Image (cartoon, helix red, strand yellow):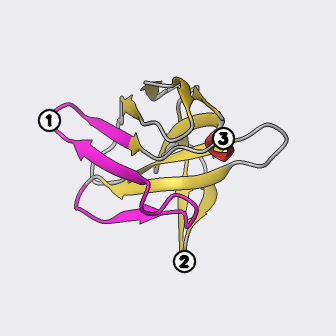
Amino acid sequence: QVRLVESGGGPVQAGGSLKLSCTGNPYKNNVMGWIRQAPGLEREGVAAINTGGSSTYYADSVKGRFTISQDNRKNTIYLHMSSLKPDDTAMYYCAAEGGEGAGIPYKFGPTTIYFGTWGQGTQVTVSS
């Protein structure tokens, strides 16, 4: 079973920054993204990027604070998070279009993307 590999999570104080990394995308020219799940809440789309181009997608709650980027030579995407808030505390999952089944849909503003390949997650904890 294909698994993406995330890294970079950890504890950080409010107002601080953190960078997440994800590698292992087995597909080409697909959309990859970050999905997060806070305790007691449903998973929500955070940011996504088209690995075959430059299009990016963001949840309204992170616009202006988070930036998603990619390094295709390393087959890696990144999530640069700044001005972090306690509400950003969550498990952050890397996900990719492709895989078995139709995938699970997540919205990024007006755009819905279906993700079928997942990582195991990395915890981000923001303290006030």
Instruction: Assign a secondary structure to mark 2.
Output: loop
N-terminal-most mark, 1 or 3: 1
Residue at image location 65% in from the left, 37% down from the top: 89
Task: Name the residue beneath numbered marker 1.
Answer: 73
Circle 2: residue type: Pro
Q: Which residue is mark 3?
A: 86
Amino acid type, residue under disc 1 in the picture = Arg
Magenta extent? 52-79
Magenta includes 59?
yes
Is label 1 in contact with label 3 (beta carbons under 8 Å)? no
Q: Is residue 38 above or below residue 68?
A: above
Does residue 103 show up?
no
Front tag of 2 and 1: 2
Q: Residue at x 39, y 42 (%)?
A: 79
The numbered mark, 2 or 1, whose residue comes first in the sequence reads 1
User: Where is residue 101 shown, x and y percent of the image?
Assistant: 61, 49
Quadrant of the image occupied by residue 107: bottom right
Q: At which x and y percent is residue 116?
A: 55, 46
Q: CA distance from mark 2 to mark 1?
A: 30 Å
Compared with 11, 96 (above or below) is below
* 34 is higher (above) or lower (below) than 120: below
In the rendered structure, find residue 110 and report the number of the disc placed on it.
Answer: 2
Horizontal relation, residue 24 to residue 113: left or right:
left
* Secondary element at image label 1: loop
Q: As shown in the figure, which amino acid type bears the numbered disc 3?
A: Pro
| Res 92 seen here | yes
